[in-house]
């Protein structure tokens, strides 16, 4: 039985594929996900901001308590990243050696599956980060 | 500053009540509150529930309860503000009385998590973040609290052992709380040996799946049954997205809400002698307490270790046992917090009593999406 | 000869390859299924690449395409075709090409489709793109070959079926790191290997996949190219063939009179296995990572069903500059982590499960 919505993902697919955020022309801060007004100063003078593909890991965790629909991905590594001017929380992938996950390491963005709706439903794709070797 | 009177309390034991529905739990807590008040003339029901629509697939829960309590009909509201639902419901009740639209408001908090296995409960955690982005990515609320725990511990040169003390004290506090989910003690070793939920948060840092309902009768008029008063309250939104917080360790809406409540009451924070704080995943305790300005940054766990904040201290914190000892029942928790502060201020029905005039109930929805604070006073 | 054919108006403006980080040693698979122990040596393959649980042909194709775009340095909106050659697409119906096109900013003014011809679908797309660009219908086209190759567990094919992706941006010769001198296709109805519509794994004709299929078609395509162009084996500096294992390319080179030294540089299968649609073309990507201006490369992909293409590609002065702008294939080949059969089985979805609880 399919459970994942089509439009919910379709509306934000470009943002998830590119991490398209916004930069405020008044206060200069950037944010993701993109909003209609600056979450810091409230200005509506915003332009698109695409962060660089590479950045740094600030802090990470590994999540065990997931729903069964993500049990193949457990534990899900998640990190707070600094990508250019943008700070963002993203899942991490290709973590084969947890010992290498230290604050400050370099990471790069890669396109991966976020979740698939069983064998018959939609697949949601989006960016994750992986440590740069 | 108008006082609202808490004239009745209902506190159901927090447990897996497989045999009772949401409505039945809500009614049981309601009747306890109404019986203790000797007051049945209510004109408003405000129900706080996070997941009735998602898990029990039930909308308009307040109407179901109203049907059996006040068949002729009354004002009904369903309030949802994440973990701050209960406190927001009390704030709404207070606003209705202040506006003159209500005189006797029954505020009920109820949620049931035991109707589904843990897998589904884990999935509901995705509603507590920006679902379109972080929900889709699988970044649940637990993982965000875990990121904060890591940041907090490294910033203040603390370790997992220091954080483990929090749930140990919470369990100790819950031993003599009749409605608490867990009334047994645990040790730091127990905590550190429990599995990770989201590193460094472990199973014994966090609440367990449960059901519960609590009710308070909020009134314009004082009565013989009055237990305590609500003096001030505030609800304010913050950032839903974790990364939009300037400092992830500072929950700005909590700072603002506490400031507002103290200002409304013209009260100095040092006069607060009792606090019930929503201590999600244990780290929520230090985060909210320090964001509120009541405890200096980085000090909570250190002071806890020194023996502070127990019953009888100048500030007693989470005598209920918090989310770990008493339990966390989503939207209902805020109402429990009000009932508990009222009970601990007054020694109601044999509850332990903290010698102070003022208590603060502090809650958040998500990690920083919304904060709600209520000031309760002894009569 | 240089400007004789329409192909020569076009070339490779950017290229990129991607291989997942994980590997499984063939000896692990041999042990698990009680296969003949000498098979890895016979096949001349040491280990094969394994996709992570959250990867698939689409995500790998995107990574390769991104590197190609970094080398091409073109405005994505000027790419007006995205072709995805694969036999392991995540959806049987719903193109993966559109997701990649959207993710790279190429949509909406573009052609896009997934192609199937076993291992040569991407190569077919390559020839079609050469046609689209040389005709002037569009300035650039993106061709991707990507597979998380399937094989019945316990079958000898499991020893080589691996995961990888390659991408090329085809554009004007003047902007290319290497241009196409000529190309040739040789296709017949020869069912040596197939996968029925609802079957998770393919079947193959064992020995039949050799002479009547692989060898006949590659030889047919290469000989046809040489006749068409007048080129001889000695005119080529490198020769890259479809590489289902580490032996067939050397054998077909011998049949064609091409010395094995010219083949070894483009032979990647011994290190990463057979990436199906990316098989020969990753060999080409590897050559472009090291070739010198003026080098001539013979490329002959093959796909079961069956067919082969042959290309004569000449490297230009732009290759060294473009090489620097993207991650080299050797980075993906050398940086690897070995996993056990159980991890491989989990990643490849070989472990039978039912849906649990979710709303």
Image (cartoon, rainbow, N blue to C red):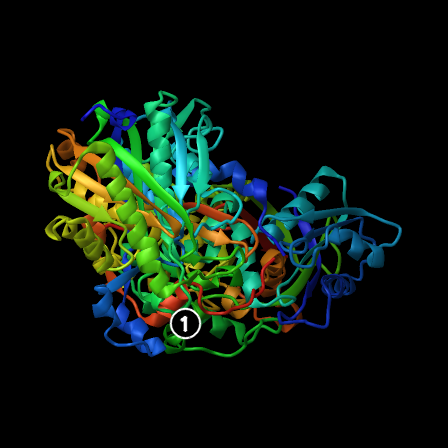
The residue located at (76%, 47%) in the rendering is B76
Looking at this rendering, what residue extends furthest in the top direction?
A: C136
B278 to the left or right of A104: right
Q: Chain of mark 1?
A: B
Q: Is residue C342 visible?
A: yes
Is residue C205 toward the left or the right of residue C2 in the image? right
Q: Residues within 10 Å of mark 1 (few under 14, many from 20)?
A: some
Q: Determine the residue positioned at 68% across, 72% down.
A: B18
Residue A99, above or below B177: above
Foreground pick, B104 / B249: B249
Q: Nearer the viewer, residue C87 or B175?
A: C87
Quadrant for the C terminus of chain C in the image: bottom right
In terms of depth relative to the viewer, which is nearer, B14 or B2? B14
Residue B24 sits in which quadrant? bottom right
x, y percent for residue C100: 41, 39
Q: Give the quarter of the image for residue B92.
A: top right
Residue B9 x/y as whole percent: 69, 62
Q: How many marks?
A: 1
Q: Position of residue C333 (x, y in %)?
A: 21, 54
Label 1 sits on a secondary structure element that is loop
Out of C84 and A76, give the one closest to the viewer: C84
Where does label 1 land, which residue? B195
* Residue at the (19%, 51%) spot, across then down: C253
Up-down: is B297 above or below C154? Answer: above
Q: Quadrant of the N terminus of chain C?
A: top left
Is B23 left or right of A56, judged from the image as shown? Answer: right
Farthest-out residue, front:
C227
Q: Position of residue A95 (x, y in %)?
A: 31, 59
> In this picture, is C82 found above or below B248?
above
Residue A54 visible, this angle: no
């Amino acid at each position: 039985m399919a459970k994942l919505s089509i439009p919910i993902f379709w509306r934000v697919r470009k943002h998830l594929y590119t991490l398209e955020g916004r930069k405020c022309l008044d206060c200069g801060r950037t944010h993701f996900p993109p909003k209609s007004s600056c979450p810091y100063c409230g200005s509506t003078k915003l332009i698109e901001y695409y962060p660089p593909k590479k950045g740094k890991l600030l802090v990470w965790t590994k999540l065990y308590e997931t729903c069964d629909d993500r049990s193949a991905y457990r534990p899900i590594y998640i990190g707070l990243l600094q990508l250019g001017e943008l700070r963002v929380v993203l899942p991490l992938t290709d973590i084969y050696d947890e010992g290498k996950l230290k604050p400050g390491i370099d990471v790069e963005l890669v396109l991966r599956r976020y979740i698939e709706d069983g064998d018959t439903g939609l697949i949601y794709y989006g960016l994750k980060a992986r440590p740069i070797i | 500053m108008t006082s609202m009177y808490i004239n009745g309390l209902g506190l159901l034991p927090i447990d897996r009540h497989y045999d009772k529905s949401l409505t039945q739990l809500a009614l049981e807590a309601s009747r306890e509150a109404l019986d203790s008040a000797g007051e049945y003339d209510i004109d408003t029901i405000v129900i706080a529930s996070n997941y009735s629509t998602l898990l029990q697939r039930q909308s308009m829960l307040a109407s179901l309860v109203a049907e059996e309590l006040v068949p002729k009909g009354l004002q009904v509201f369903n309030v949802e503000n994440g973990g701050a639902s209960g406190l927001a419901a009390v704030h709404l009740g207070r606003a209705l009385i202040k506006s003159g639209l209500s005189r006797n408001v029954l505020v009920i908090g109820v949620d049931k998590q035991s109707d589904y296995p843990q897998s589904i409960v884990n999935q509901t955690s995705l509603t507590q973040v920006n679902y379109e982005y972080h929900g889709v990515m699988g970044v649940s609320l637990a993982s965000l609290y875990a990121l904060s725990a890591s940041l907090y511990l490294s910033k203040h040169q603390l370790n997992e052992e220091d954080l483990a003390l929090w749930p140990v004290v919470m369990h100790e506090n819950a031993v003599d709380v009749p409605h608490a989910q867990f009334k047994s003690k645990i040790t730091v070793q127990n905590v550190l040996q429990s599995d990770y939920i989201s590193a460094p948060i472990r199973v014994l840092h966090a609440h367990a799946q449960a059901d519960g309902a609590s009710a308070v009768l909020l009134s314009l008029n004082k009565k013989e049954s009055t237990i305590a008063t609500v003096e001030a309250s505030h609800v304010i939104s913050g950032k839903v997205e974790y990364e939009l917080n300037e400092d992830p360790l500072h929950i700005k809406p909590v700072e603002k809400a506490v400031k507002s409540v103290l200002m409304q009451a013209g009260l100095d924070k040092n006069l607060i002698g009792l606090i019930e704080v929503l201590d999600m995943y244990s780290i929520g305790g230090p985060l909210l307490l320090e964001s509120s300005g009541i405890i200096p940054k980085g000090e909570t766990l250190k002071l806890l270790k020194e023996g502070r904040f127990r019953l009888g201290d100048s500030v007693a914190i989470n005598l209920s046992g918090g989310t770990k000892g008493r339990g966390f029942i989503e939207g209902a928790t805020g109402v429990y917090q009000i009932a508990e502060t009222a009970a601990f201020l007054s020694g109601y029905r044999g509850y332990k009593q903290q010698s102070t005039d003022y208590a603060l109930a502090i809650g958040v929805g998500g990690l920083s999406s919304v904060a709600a604070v209520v000031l309760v006073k002894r009569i | 000869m240089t400007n004789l054919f329409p192909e020569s108006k076009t070339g490779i403006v950017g290229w990129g390859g991607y291989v997942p980080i994980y590997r499984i040693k063939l000896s692990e698979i041999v042990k698990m299924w009680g296969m003949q122990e000498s098979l890895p040596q016979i096949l001349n393959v040491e280990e094969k690449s394994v996709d992570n649980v959250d990867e698939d042909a689409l995500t790998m194709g995107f990574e390769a395409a991104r590197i190609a775009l970094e080398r091409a340095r073109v405005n994505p909106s000027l790419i007006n075709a995205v072709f995805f050659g694969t036999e392991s697409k995540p959806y049987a119906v719903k193109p993966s090409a559109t997701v990649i096109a959207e993710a790279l900013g190429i949509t909406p003014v573009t052609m896009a489709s997934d192609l199937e011809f076993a291992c040569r679908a991407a190569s077919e797309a390559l020839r079609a793109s050469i046609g689209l660009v040389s005709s002037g219908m569009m300035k650039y086209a993106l061709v991707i070959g990507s597979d998380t190759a399937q094989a019945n567990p316990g079958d000898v094919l499991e020893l080589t079926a691996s995961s990888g992706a390659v991408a090329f941006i085809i554009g004007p010769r003047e902007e290319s790191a290497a241009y196409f001198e000529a190309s040739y296709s040789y296709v017949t109805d020869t069912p040596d290997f197939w996968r029925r519509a609802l079957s998770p794994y393919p079947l193959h004709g064992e020995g039949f996949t050799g002479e009547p299929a692989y060898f006949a078609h590659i030889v047919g395509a290469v000989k046809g190219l040489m006749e068409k162009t007048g080129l001889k084996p000695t005119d080529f500096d490198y020769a890259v063939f479809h590489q289902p294992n580490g032996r067939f390319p050397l054998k077909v080179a011998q049949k064609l009179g091409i010395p094995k030294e010219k083949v070894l540089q483009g032979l990647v299968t011994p290190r990463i296995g057979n990436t199906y649609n990316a098989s020969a073309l990753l060999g080409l990507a590897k050559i472009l990572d090291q070739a010198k201006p003026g080098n001539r490369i013979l490329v002959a992909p093959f796909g079961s069903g069956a067919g082969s293409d042959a290309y004569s590609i000449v490297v230009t002065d732009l290759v060294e500059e473009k090489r620097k702008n993207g991650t080299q294939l050797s980075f993906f080949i050398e940086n690897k982590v070995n996993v056990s059969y159980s991890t491989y089985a989990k990643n490849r979805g070989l472990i039978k499960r039912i849906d649990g609880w979710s709303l």
